[in-house]
Image (spheres, rainbow, N blue to C red):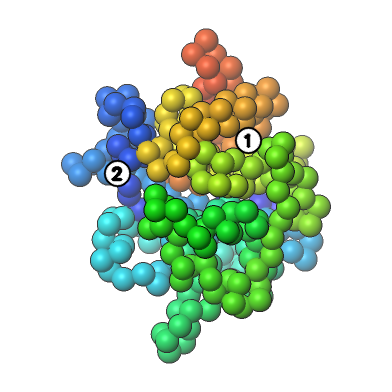
């Protein structure tokens, strides 16, 4: 097995929205804001090469929305999935599986693209299965008013229409051991219903793709919860369970949205679970 970080592009989000009720003087210590109160955000995906399978976890925003849409997110840098895949010797047609932690546009938008004549949409990974779970799929395709703007039908429905959609199981005990994908899944409901956090074994280490359970290093303190979360009190409980487990077992946490920190470990302190060490994928595994 080999792991590769895949950069799907960078953007900015409002710092207040990213930290909810936490005052700016606290969160800006780790996530400094610009003059518009926007903070740096990454769309860092993860590619797993395992035998004849290439599993891509999340796909970023994609590029099919209009300029007005992207204008809200202040795109920066020149990273794309195609450039990042090519840097590791791969092409999007090589991908066998796309695993989506959840179906918010910044996590799955790159899974679907315009067709050739821009009259409709098609899978951006023509040879891949797209993995979600039935509970979250129903949540996303029958969206509540809070999340409707994040679940864009053009990102979601073409997966099913193509016949390439597959579902994992779900677990009420947080962790599902999924033999079909080759890694365990931690389910978290605070951000959105049945968000999936992949947990894989690699070179004797447990690597956890944190998605929106832990967006950045700045979100390590338990009360630092995004304003986007639909059930923030539940997020508090889920973070406590997961981060204590991570500190107890020295998990390596792969951060999807932290533009400046790729992988971290955490430790127990008098103030709770806090940052221990930071790593890059290249430095950690090469």
Q: Which residue lies furthest to the bottom in this view?
A: 117
Give the crowd class for mark 1: few <14, some 14-19, many >=20 residues within 10 Å.
many
Q: Is disc 2 placed on a helix, strand or loop? A: strand
> Residue 159: x percent and y percent?
58, 71
Front position in the image: 204 or 230: 230
Rounded to the nearest angstrom, the CA distance separating label 2 from label 1 is 27 Å
> Residue 202: x percent and y percent?
73, 43
Question: Is the residue 277 above or below the residue 3 in the image?
Answer: above
Q: Residue 14 carries which label?
A: 2
Q: Which mark is residue 29?
A: none
Residue drawn where x is 60% and y is 72% of the image:
160
Question: Is the residue 178 above or below the residue 186 in the image?
Answer: below
Residue drawn where x is 27% and y is 38% of the image:
33
Residue bearing mark 1:
252
Q: Is disc 1 placed on a helix, strand or loop? A: strand
> Residue 154: x percent and y percent?
46, 71
Q: Quadrant of the C terminus?
A: top right
> Residue 57: x percent and y percent?
60, 56
């Amino acid at each position: 097995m080999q792991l590769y970080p895949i950069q799907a592009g960078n953007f900015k989000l409002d710092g207040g929205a990213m930290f909810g009720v936490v005052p700016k003087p606290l969160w800006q210590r780790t996530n400094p804001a610009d003059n518009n109160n926007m903070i740096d955000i990454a769309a860092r995906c993860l590619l797993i090469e395992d035998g004849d399978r290439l599993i891509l976890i999340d796909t970023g925003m994609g590029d099919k929305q209009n300029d007005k849409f992207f204008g809200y997110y202040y795109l920066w840098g020149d990273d794309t999935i195609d450039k990042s895949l090519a840097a590791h010797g791969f092409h999007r047609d090589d991908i066998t599986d796309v695993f989506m932690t959840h179906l918010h546009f910044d996590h799955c938008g790159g899974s679907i693209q315009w067709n050739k004549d821009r009259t409709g949409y098609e899978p951006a990974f023509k040879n891949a299965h797209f993995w979600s779970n039935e509970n979250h799929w129903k949540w996303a395709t029958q969206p509540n008013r809070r999340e409707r703007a994040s679940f864009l039908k053009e990102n979601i429905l073409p997966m099913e229409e193509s016949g390439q959609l597959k579902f994992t199981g779900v677990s009420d005990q947080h962790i599902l051991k999924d033999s079909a994908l080759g890694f365990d899944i931690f389910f978290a409901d605070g951000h959105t219903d049945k968000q999936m956090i992949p947990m894989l074994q690699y070179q004797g280490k447990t690597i956890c793709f944190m998605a929106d359970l832990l967006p950045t290093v700045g979100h390590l303190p338990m009360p630092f919860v995004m304003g986007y979360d639909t059930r923030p009190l539940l997020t508090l409980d889920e973070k406590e369970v997961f981060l204590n487990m991570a500190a107890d077992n020295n998990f390596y946490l792969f951060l999807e949205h932290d533009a400046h920190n790729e992988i971290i470990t955490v430790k127990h302190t008098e103030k709770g679970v806090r940052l221990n060490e930071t790593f890059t994928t290249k430095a950690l595994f090469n």
